[in-house]
Amino acid sequence: MKKIILTVFAATSLLLYSTPSFAFSISLGVPIDYTFAEGSSEKDSFSGYFLGVQLPFAMGLGIDSHKYKAKGSTDTVNTNIYNLFYQLPIPVINLILGLGVGSQNLECADSGRSDDTVISCKDAYDKGSVTQWYTSIGFPIIPLFDIHLSYRSITSKKMKAKSGGTEMDYSGSVTGIGFAFNF
């Protein structure tokens, strides 16, 4: 009887230690790769961040903001997305599924100026809308921190040139890496 109680106690301790029991979580990530669905553009630069706050009931809110510039182009694609996500109750790993909506626009370098001043392309292009789904998998490194990898699939809509109405498709995928602090 003593062995059974000791075994149950040991198994319960291990199970409860690996199950997250924190009230809030704040995560911050950065994009490490950006790929357009058409695959025709070679990357010159990309930057941005992913910010998320998880509430005590496994739901969370997030903001994604990133920029992408194709090689040989002076235009930068600027994307801002607001997310709603859910962390699945899986012990040992943190698996998150999320959806987001937002906007996408172009920032253009004015070729007529020598200082490459960034202007908005409001006169030439309509602002587009985007939707995304994403997943993130996190691995706890110590009880209060985890490191996570994410994949985001972005669908771009309605960004078109005002003169001629040519639609531009900047759909694609973004992979990222980040960390979370649980408290």
Image (cartoon, rainbow, N blue to C red):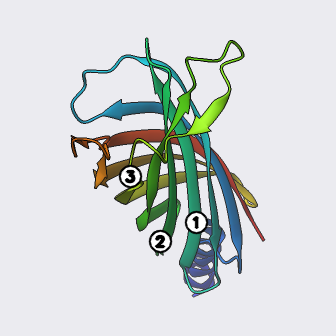
Q: Quadrant of the N terminus?
A: bottom right
Q: Residues within 10 Å of mark 1 (few under 14, many from 20)?
A: many
Is 51 or 36 nearer to us in this picture?
Answer: 36
Amino acid type shown at disc 1 = Gly
Q: Is residue 89 above or below residue 1?
A: above
Ranked by sequence position, the earlier of labels 1 and 2 is 1
State whether residue 45 appears in this view.
yes
- The residues tagged by marks 2 and 3 sit, at their Cα atoms, a distance apart of 29 Å
Q: Residues within 10 Å of mark 3 (few under 14, many from 20)?
A: some
Q: Residue at x 28, y 42 (%)?
A: 163
Q: Residues within 10 Å of mark 2 (few under 14, many from 20)?
A: many
Residue 85 has which mark? 2
| Quarter of the figure with residue 71 | top left
x%, y% of residue 5?
Answer: 60, 85
Q: Residue at x 32, y 47 (%)?
A: 162
x%, y% of residue 128?
Answer: 37, 55
